[in-house]
Amino acid sequence: MKALKALALPAALVVLAEIGARAAAPSDSVAPPSEVAAAFVQALADGSLVTATRDTLMSAFAGLAIGASLGLMTGILLGSLNVLDRLMELPLELLRPIPSVAVIPIALVALGFGYRLEIVIVAFACFWPLLILSRAAVDGVEPRLIEVSRALRLTPLQRTVKIVAPAVLPRVFVAFRLAAGISLIVAVTVEIAVNPQGLGYEVMTAGQALRPDLMLAYVLWIGIVGFAFNAGLVFAQRRLFGQAARVEAAR
Amino acid sequence: MTAATLIAFRDVDLAFGDHLVLGKLTFEIHEGEIVCIVGPSGCGKTTALRVAAGLIAPTRGEIAFAGAPVRGPRRDVAIVFQDYSKALLPWRTAAGNVSLALEALGTPRAERPKRIAALLKRVGLPRHADKFPSQLSGGMQQRLQIARCLAQEPAALMMDEPFGALDAMTRQTLQDEMLEIARATKATIFFVTHDLEEAIYLGDRVIGLMPHPGRIGIELKIDLPRPRNQVTTRESPEFLRLRHKLYDFIHASEKGEAA
C-alpha cells in the first residue's frame, strides 16, 4: 500500500510527460516516455548501453579507489602529525579550490584520451573529501581516550586498531559516500567534456544526433546507476556500522 | 601498622611554561592506604594525580612507585577519570570496555569472558554486559570505568574526582562500594576530590593543598572506625571536628588567594 502511494506521483508524471511530449512533437529536446523506453531497450539490446556503463563505472571506481585511499592516508597522516599538517596547509588550501574540470586540459595534454585521463580526474575530485574529513576525524578523537590508551600502555598499533580506527571509521565512511557520489558526476562530466567513451559521451552524441529519446534514456539511466550505487553504500554502511549508528541514535 | 611506602613525592616541581603549578611537593602514600587530596580549585590536585600516574613528568624532583622512579604510566596503576562518558569506548559494550584492559594486559582470549563477568559482577553490572555506555546511567558508566580499572589488578587506584559529576544519592552508594572494593582488594587509593566531607568519609589521611604553587597546607589523620557508615560516621563528633578544621583551612587558603 505504501509502495503504491510512493509510485502514484511518478506514474502520474510519466502520463503527463507522455501527453505533453506528444503535443510538442516533433522536438529535438524532448521525447515521450514510451519512445525513451523503446530507445533504452534498443541501446540495451545492441550492447552500447552495457559498454558505456562499464566504461563509466570502471573509471569512476578506479578513480574513487585511488583518490579515496590517497586522501584517507594523507588525512590520517596530517591528523596525527601536527608539524606536517602546518607545513601542508597552504599548498593544500591552494590546490583544493581548483575545480576538477579545470584539471582536464592538463590531464589531457599529459595523458591523452582514455581511461587514464578520466581516472586521474576522478581521483583528484575524490581525494579532497576523504582528506578533509579523515584529518578532522583523527583530530577529533576524544583526547581522554588517547589518555586511556596511554594509561593501559597500548602499543601504537593497538592504539590505532582499537581506539583511533573505530573512532574515525563511521565518519570516514560518510566521506567515502560523498566521494562515491562525486566520482560518478565527475566521470560523466569528463566524458561529456572531452573523453570519447562512457555514458556521458553517449548522452552527448545522442543529443548531437538529434535523438532526444536516446539522450533522455541515457540521462535517466545515469540517474538509476547513481541511485543504485548510493543505495548499495547505504546498505553497506548499515551493515558495517549498525552498532555505532544505534549508539548515535540513542544519544 | 608501619606499612611500606608505595608512592613517594620528593620535592616535586611542575611548571607549565613560567607558571609553577606544583612547588616542592613532598609526601608519601603507604601500601593499602586511602589518601584523599582536597584543595581550592586551581591548587594542582588533579595535576598531582596526573604526575603520580605518570601521565605528566615532573619538571624537577622525583616520583617513586614501590621504590622505583616513575617514568610513565604503569599497568599496575589504574586511573579512574572524572568524565566517565569520555573515558569509555562508545562503540564497545560494557563487556567490551572491560575487555580493553584485558587485551592490553595480554590476557588469553579464552580467559577473558570469565574475568569480565566477575568484574562486572563486582561493580554491580552483571546484567548490563551487552549494553553500550550510552545506554547506561552516569553512575553505571562510572562503575564500568572502575571495572575496567580493576581488570588491571592494580596495586594503586588513581581516582580523579570520580564521583564529582554524580547526584548525591548515587555518589554515596559509590563511595561505599569503593570502600568495599578497597577493603577486598587491599589496593592503595589516591583520591582527588573537591568535596571535603567525601575526603574525610573515605580517607585514612586527608591532604589539603594550597594554590600558587600547589603545596601541602594541612594534613589530617582520619581515625574514624571502619566500616564507615553514611549516617553514623557523618554524625560522629570526630567527623564534625575534622570537617570544621578542613573547612577553616580551605576558607583561609581561598581568602589568602583573594588578598
Image (cartoon, rainbow, N blue to C red):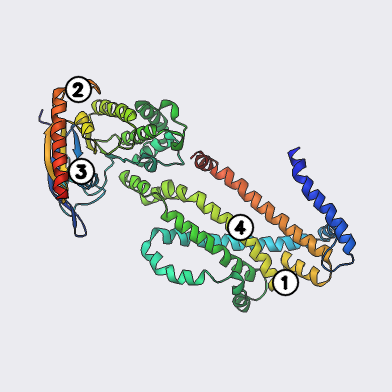
Task: Describe residue B78's horizontal placement relative to residue A127 as left or right.
Answer: left
Q: Of helix, strand and loop, which one carries label 2?
A: helix
How much space separates mark 3 and mark 2, taking CA atoms?
Answer: 25 Å
Q: Chain of mark 3?
A: B
The crowding category of the residue bearing disc 4, from other C-alpha atoms within 10 Å (few below 14, some 14 to 19, many at least 20), is many
The crowding category of the residue bearing disc 3, from other C-alpha atoms within 10 Å (few below 14, some 14 to 19, many at least 20), is some
Reading the image, the residue beneath label 4 is A180
Callouts 3 and 4 in the same chain = no
Callouts 4 and 2 in the same chain = no
User: Given the image, on which type of amino acid does mark 3 rest?
Assistant: Pro
Q: Which quadrant of the figure has residue B78?
A: top left
A55 to A239, vertically: above or below: below
Mark identifier at residue B40? 3
- The answer to whether residue A134 is seen in the rendering is yes
Callouts 2 and 1 in the same chain = no
Numbered disc in front, either 1 or 4: 4
